[in-house]
Amino acid sequence: MHLDVQDLRNFYYRSTLGRAAQASIRNQLCALWPESKGQTVAGFGFALPLLRPYLADARRVVALMPAPQGVMPWPANMPNVTVLSEETLWPLETGRVDRLVVMHGLETSERPSALLEECWRVLGPGGKAIFIVPNRAGLWSRSDRTPFGYGRPYTLGQLEGQLEQHDFLPERHSAALYQLPSTRRFWLKSAPLFEKVGARMPTVMAGGAFLVEVSKRVAPPSGTVTKEWSRNPIPALSPKPETSPV
């Protein structure tokens, strides 16, 4: 079940903990994708906190928001790029997206398989996607004070396995949200230290959210390749006959 867009906006833009979470995930995303010059970047779910770095250089940025969640205009004081969309029927042409970010979309979807099929459809040749989901073993998935406490959390193996079943090839993974999901001042002030130390730890240990980068896998043509010999082969060229002098 998707959260309401107002609750997501209040968390990420009007709370100290939400702004810290936004910074943690965005830093990891920018480390994987430092630039998007001339590319089409799309987000699904509530990916707004992560798309701002790409507004300046990307050819096009679009943020798709599922109908059960609701939509909000974004960014402020700039042309709107958000679109209210059916969860498994996006208003995008097939193969037009170069970079896709999915956050608060997969774990809350009632039809995850159909959603992944739609993600695969819109990605173009060489396109890549990053899926951001709660870590089942992390503290953030156990607290309903944040959006990461809703929906189905994943282990890294579960997420990569589900993506592979839908013709995605996992390439890299990272983690974020090593800080505690607490609003107490002491823990909030300690958040940068937790993120710095956590970034040096194995991904599966303490991060509250996983980021998995995948590419679109295209299956080769099926069937058996056969050779067909021409029934009328081209005759070998014979040397030009010599002509006698007149």
Image (cartoon, grey):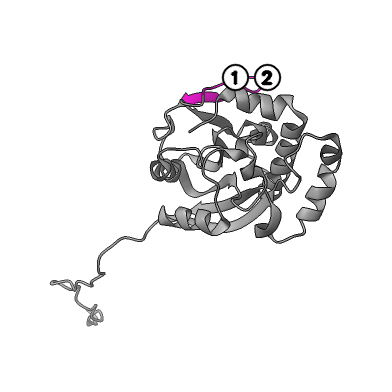
Mark 2 element type: loop
Residue 232, above or below 124 = below
Which of 11/180 is in front?
Answer: 180
Residue 82 x %, y %: 55, 24
Task: Identify the residue at the far left of this view.
Answer: 231
Q: Left or right: 141 with respect to 92?
A: right
What residue does disc 1 label?
73
**Above-or-below relation of 179 to 48:** below
Q: Is residue 54 visible?
A: no
Q: Is residue 238 visible?
A: yes
- For the C terminus, give its image quadrant: bottom left
Q: Which residue is mark 2?
A: 76
**Position of residue 72 measured from the top left corner of the image (x, y, whole percent):** 58, 20
Residue 91 location (% of width, % of height): 43, 29
Observer-nearest residue: 23 or 177? 177
Q: Which residues are magenta?
A: 70-84
Q: In the shown orientation, is residue 94 left or right of residue 32?
A: left
Give the crowd class for mark 1: few <14, some 14-19, many >=20 residues within 10 Å. Answer: few
